[in-house]
Image (cartoon, helix red, strand yellow):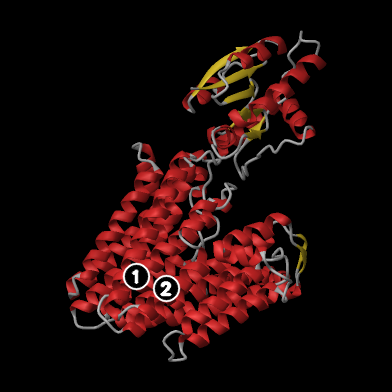
């Protein structure tokens, strides 16, 4: 149980003790700094502890935001400071310093705020939540206290809490058609003890049932699939809103929320393809193409953000123009909608599934996502070209991890006699050779093309990825590997080849998404043994081309299936092992707009 040390003389009529207990704190009272230090030392090191001024006046949700958020080792609001185990040593040191400064005999009422000042002086990262209209203050006299209490009464604490459960920046469809009622579902769930992870799981199950309904290939099945897909999206919004409403963030929850979104959408693609096959229409190539396009869009987003989020001198006239456009109300919604974020995309897929055919659904999806990808990528390229930025070693390492080079590329890097040129140009050249070989019509040409591609992959990462457009290297590699599998499976022209390719790309894409979420959580990239075991992008590409050239079409299909299962088992085992036992800090990923 968490412990709150209340400092100073209790104020008649104050609800601070009751508020702290309602937030799960065991309240102890200290009369001076000596007692405060003693009480702090008595709290077990694996428990949260807070120091709160007895004169505190404010909303309960202000205390909740300041003292219970699991994402931050140290956090504070005026009159209160808290530490989780990771920040405990810093808090203890700061309290001891204030104890020594005060001679240990008198506990000044502003101890909590002085401790925060000491933490800042030590260079500690103290989180201060945005309170908005919420009140959190330490009145110095009765008149100020009465004014503060009136300010508390003037603001509906629960209304603010409910509003803050909704993401501040979201898509048009989600903002206007989901969030107005999903927040109330979130509150209902939170009050009944349902966790975000339980709702996330319910969203996944609903999406899988939607995919199964689409797989029936009947009009009632397609209609049910569309309805269930929207229901799954509502639950997907609810899980994050519960996390924000109840501050129930967790490492596992962030991972589930992020990976399940992709699993739901791609499982639905497979369901549509199965349903179309029942009606005699083979759209597996379209389904795989849609998954590849969507995954590559995400890699563009991830790579660009990783390259620039901690860059110095990070200015761009293009970014300034974008910010200016965001200040004009109608342009905000237009620009959010044309990138086809998850809400708009799923709504479009649901409606098209219900009223048209899977083929039409995929055609519209591919055209829409292609336009959105062109728009967003062009904007990012323009920003990069006009941006004066110096990228850090951390960013370069993140991009290298996202590139997913395997042992073959690593060997090329070790024996590299010299650098051939800019990383992006090398990667693009190797990819161009690979693409040409795939369409050459010569049986073993793709193997040669894949070998050249593997060599250039090693060359591309022979220097840190700090160039203006080096963040495009991982997306180029993703597109090259995934499209190789698609093209070779399509050329096999046998039943089962494209579904097997879909499974292989899905398994590899999961590995790439998992790498992204590890990096975002500051937990490092996937372990080296896993990257070696599944070959890296260049190793898998070369292997698939060899299998396609050496085996018959039917044997190639079996080989793709075996490879898909093997990769899936390895990446799922390691991913689940890591995230269930991860020591990474609790986070809440607000999700990708796309």
Where is mark 2, residue-wise? 544
Instruction: Using the image as rendered, state which of residue 262 and residue 406 is in the foreground.
Output: 406
Along the polypeptide, which appears first: circle 2 or circle 1?
2
Q: Which mark is residue 39?
A: none
Please report the residue visible at 36 percent of the width from the left and 59 percent of the height from the top.
566
Q: Position of residue 364 (x, y in %)?
A: 39, 81
For disc 2, the neighbor class at 10 Å (few under 14, some 14 to 19, many from 20) is: many
Q: Is residue 454 visible?
A: yes
Query: Within the image, what quadrant is residue 554 found in?
Result: bottom left
Please report the residue visible at 52 percent of the width from the left and 54 percent of the height from the top.
517
Instruction: Using the image as rendered, state which of residue 401 and residue 420 is in the foreground.
Output: 420
Where is mark 1, residue-wise? 560
Residue that extends furthest to the bottom in the rendered view of this protein? 441
Q: Which secondary structure lies at badge 2?
A: helix
Q: Position of residue 10 (x, y in %)?
A: 62, 15
How far apart are the alpha carbons under marks 2 and 1? 8 Å
For disc 1, the neighbor class at 10 Å (few under 14, some 14 to 19, many from 20) is: many
Circles 2, 1 touching at the beta carbon (< 8 Å): yes
Query: Within the image, what quadrant is residue 232 found in?
Result: bottom left
Please report the residue visible at 74 percent of the width from the left and 24 percent of the height from the top.
94
Relative to 185, 241 lies left or right: right
């Amino acid at each position: 149980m968490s412990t709150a040390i209340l400092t100073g003389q209790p104020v008649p009529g104050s609800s601070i003790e009751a508020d702290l207990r309602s937030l799960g704190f065991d309240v102890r009272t200290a009369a001076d700094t000596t007692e405060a230090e003693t009480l702090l030392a008595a709290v077990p090191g694996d428990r949260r502890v807070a120091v709160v001024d007895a004169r505190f006046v404010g909303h309960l949700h202000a205390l909740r935001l300041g003292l219970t958020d699991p994402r931050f080792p140290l956090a504070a609001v005026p009159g209160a400071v808290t530490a989780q185990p990771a920040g405990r040593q810093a808090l203890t040191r700061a309290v001891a310093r204030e104890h020594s400064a005060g001679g240990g005999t008198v506990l000044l009422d502003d101890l909590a705020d002085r401790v925060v000042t000491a933490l800042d002086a030590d260079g500690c990262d103290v989180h201060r939540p945005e309170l908005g209209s919420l009140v959190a203050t330490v009145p110095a006299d009765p008149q100020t206290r009465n004014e503060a209490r009136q300010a508390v009464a003037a603001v509906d604490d629960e209304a603010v809490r409910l509003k803050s459960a909704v993401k501040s920046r979201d898509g048009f469809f989600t903002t206007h058609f989901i969030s107005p009622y999903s927040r109330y579902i979130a509150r209902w769930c939170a009050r009944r003890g349902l966790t975000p992870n339980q709702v996330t799981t319910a969203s996944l199950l609903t999406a899988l049932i939607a995919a199964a309904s689409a797989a029936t290939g009947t009009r009632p099945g397609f209609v049910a699939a569309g309805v269930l897909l929207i229901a799954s999206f509502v639950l997907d919004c609810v899980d994050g809103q519960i996390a924000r409403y109840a501050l129930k963030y967790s490492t596992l929850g962030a991972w589930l929320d992020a990976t399940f979104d992709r699993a739901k959408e791609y499982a639905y693609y497979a369901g549509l393809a199965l349903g179309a096959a029942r009606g005699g229409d083979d759209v597996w190539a379209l389904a795989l193409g849609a998954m590849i396009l969507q995954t590559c869009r995400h890699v563009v987003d991830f790579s660009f953000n990783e390259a620039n989020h901690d860059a110095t001198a990070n200015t761009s006239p293009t970014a300034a123009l974008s910010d200016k456009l965001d200040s004009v109300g109608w342009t905000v919604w237009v620009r959010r909608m044309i990138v086809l974020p998850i809400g708009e995309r799923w709504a479009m897929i649901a409606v098209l599934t219900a009223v048209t055919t899977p083929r039409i659904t995929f055609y519209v999806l591919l055209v829409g996502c292609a336009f959105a990808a062109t728009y967003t990528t062009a904007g990012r390229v323009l920003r990069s070209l006009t941006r004066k930025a110096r990228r850090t070693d951390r960013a370069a390492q993140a991009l290298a991890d996202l590139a997913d080079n395997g042992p073959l590329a690593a060997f090329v890097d070790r024996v590299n006699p010299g650098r051939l040129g800019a990383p992006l140009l090398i990667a693009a050249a190797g990819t161009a050779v690979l693409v040409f070989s795939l369409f050459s019509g010569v049986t073993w040409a793709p193997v040669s093309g894949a070998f050249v591609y593997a060599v250039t992959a090693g060359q591309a990462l022979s220097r840190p990825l700090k160039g203006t457009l080096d963040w495009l290297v991982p997306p180029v590699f993703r597109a090259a590997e995934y499209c190789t599998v698609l093209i070779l499976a399509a050329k096999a022209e046998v039943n089962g080849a494209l579904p097997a390719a879909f499974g292989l790309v899905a398994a590899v894409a999961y590995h790439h998404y998992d790498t992204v979420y590890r990096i975002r959580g500051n937990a490092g990239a996937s372990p080296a043994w896993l990257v070696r075991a599944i070959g890296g992008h260049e190793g898998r590409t070369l292997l698939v081309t060899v299998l396609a050239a050496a085996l018959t079409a039917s044997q190639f299909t079996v080989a793709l299936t075996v490879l898909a299962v093997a990769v899936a088992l390895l990446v799922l085992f390691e991913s689940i092992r890591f995230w269930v036992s991860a020591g990474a800090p609790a986070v809440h990923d607000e999700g990708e707009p796309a």
